[in-house]
């Protein structure tokens, strides 16, 4: 689980996917990141999410 630095997004790793949550509206964002799991980390500007992958590598997701 990771929050963006501005606190607007929450990324939650569940099994082999990561779900994004909009904290302002308290709703899920319709963008599931498959083959992604924890650890999770947002970039400083909140535009990229780094996740571990099921292939033992790092994936970068542009949000």
Image: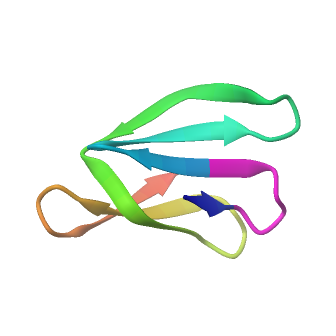
The outermost residue toward the bottom is: 44
Is residue 40 found left or right of 42 in the rendered image? left
Q: Report which quarter residue 46 is drawn in.
A: bottom right
Range shown magenta: 4-10
Is residue 1 found left or right of 5 in the rendered image? left
Residue 49 within the segment the image draws in magenta = no
Residue 24, above or below 55: above
Is residue 16 found left or right of 49 in the rendered image? left
Numbered circles on residues, count? 0
Identity of the residue drawn at 71% across and 62% down: 4
Residue 35, above or below 25: below
Q: Report which quarter residue 6 is drawn in.
A: bottom right
Is residue 31 found left or right of 29 in the rendered image? left
Q: Residue 37 at x, y = what percent?
A: 33, 55
Identity of the residue drawn at 69% across and 61% down: 3
Identity of the residue drawn at 72% across and 69% down: 45
Q: Residue 19 at x, y = what percent?
A: 50, 38
Q: Residue 1 at x, y = what percent?
A: 54, 58
Confirm whether residue 63 shows in the render: no
Residue 48, above or below 31: below
Residue 61, above or below 30: below
Question: How has the structure been colored for display?
Answer: rainbow
Confirm whether residue 10 shows in the render: yes
Q: For this rendering, which residue is in front, 19 or 62?
A: 19
Please identify the dominant SS of the magenta region: loop
Q: Report which quarter residue 52 is drawn in.
A: bottom left
Q: For this rendering, which residue is in front, 45 or 52?
A: 52
The outermost residue toward the right is: 24
């Amino acid at each position: 689980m990771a929050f963006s630095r501005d606190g607007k997004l929450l990324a939650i790793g569940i099994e082999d996917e990561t779900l994004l949550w909009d904290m302002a509206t308290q709703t899920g964002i319709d963008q599931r990141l498959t083959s992604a799991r924890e650890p999770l980390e947002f970039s400083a500007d909140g535009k990229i999410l780094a996740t571990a992958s099921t292939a033992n590598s790092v994936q970068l997701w542009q949000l």
